[in-house]
Image (cartoon, grey):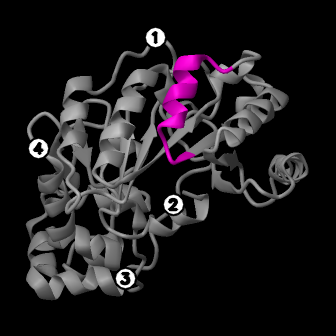
Amino acid sequence: MELAELVGLRPFPAAGLLLGLTRRCPLRCRHCSTGSDLTVREEPNAAQLLRFVGSFTTENRPDVVMLTGGEPLLLPTLAGELSFLARRAGSRTAVLSGMFFARSQRIPPAILRAIAQVDHFSASLDVYHEREVARADVFRALHHIRESGVSVSFHLTGTGADDPYLADITRAIDKEFGGRVPSLVNEVRPFGRAASWARPARTGPDPSAAAPCSMAAWPVVAFDGTVLACCNQDTVDRRPAPAHLDLGHIGSDDWAAVRRRALESPVLRMIRTVGPTHLAARSGAAPHPGSYCDGCRALGGNEAVAAGARAVASGPAGALLDLAA
């Protein structure tokens, strides 16, 4: 599976599933959105994770499962087992790694076996990761993984379009891999260890204008096993989760139940189609003073918003909204 296929599925509701295997990580990158380190022990129950992914069927499964963390390859056996179960049902799998293992001259066998189980491998690389793992070591490990037959890409993070690091690293990747390894570029956001210094999240758009949210497309299994409709880090971390973004728990729900809630929720349909700000405005709710994502979380429990969403986005007619988005 190539990066373009993975990114192309991102806007489609329930086409993918994000699994946070652990919040542990051997690195302490300054921009880490989860604030991960080796002392953090928050992670879903492994048996519940396996049962949840084992509930996929060939008729009802996500197209792609993304294993992330923390550092998912601190649990290589679990990562491999989850990938096996998902692929058995017909899902494709990907893993995003901070590349801690690249500091060794040889990739540990257990990690190499886990990587061989996935359809795509993505390496995080940015100025902050390079302070933990040398660029040359990451490149060497990626060559090895590519030669094993697994599709690879880079997950780059910078401070914006004018970040000189991004210009430098993209040139270096093209030179090293002959233009054959793609990159996904994201901007640092003020979450986790970056909360005190990264630029603020975007403010809400004009309430009269539709501003759809694709972050409400793929369910996310958080570190306590809660399944959420949004991958915004504040939503993943904070409890209680807003009712409209809470899709269940891997200890009590299977994929079919989670997928049904994600697809059939009128509020989520409207968030994906017109965005939370426009949804609130058309329901008569007062504008929220915080960011776009703060405004979305504030919709939870607002019966006027829920009623307005039900009036437009319930049932088979409402399902057409996701097709039009």
* Magenta segment boundaries in residue numbering: 107-120
- For the residues labelled 1 and 2, the Cα–Cα distance comes to 32 Å
Establish if 315 lies above or below 105: below
As shown in the figure, which amino acid type bears the numbered disc 1?
Thr
Q: Closer to us: mark 4 or mark 1?
A: 4
Q: Closer to us: mark 2 or mark 4?
A: 2
What residue sits 33% from the left and 79% below the top? 273
As shown in the figure, which amino acid type bears the numbered disc 3?
Ala
Tell me whether the residue at label 3 lies in contact with that at label 2, contact meaning CB atoms closer than 8 angstroms.
no
Q: Secondary structure at mark 3?
A: loop
Locate the C terminus and report the quarter of the image it occupies. bottom left
Tell me which numbered mark, 3 or 4, is placed earlier along the sequence.
Answer: 4
Tell me which numbered mark, 1 or 2, is placed earlier along the sequence.
Answer: 2
In the picture of the structure, the residue carrying the numbered disc 4 is 253
The image position of residue 108, as x and y in percent, is 61, 17
In the picture of the structure, the residue carrying the numbered disc 1 is 39
In the picture of the structure, the residue carrying the numbered disc 3 is 325
Q: Closer to us: mark 3 or mark 2?
A: 2
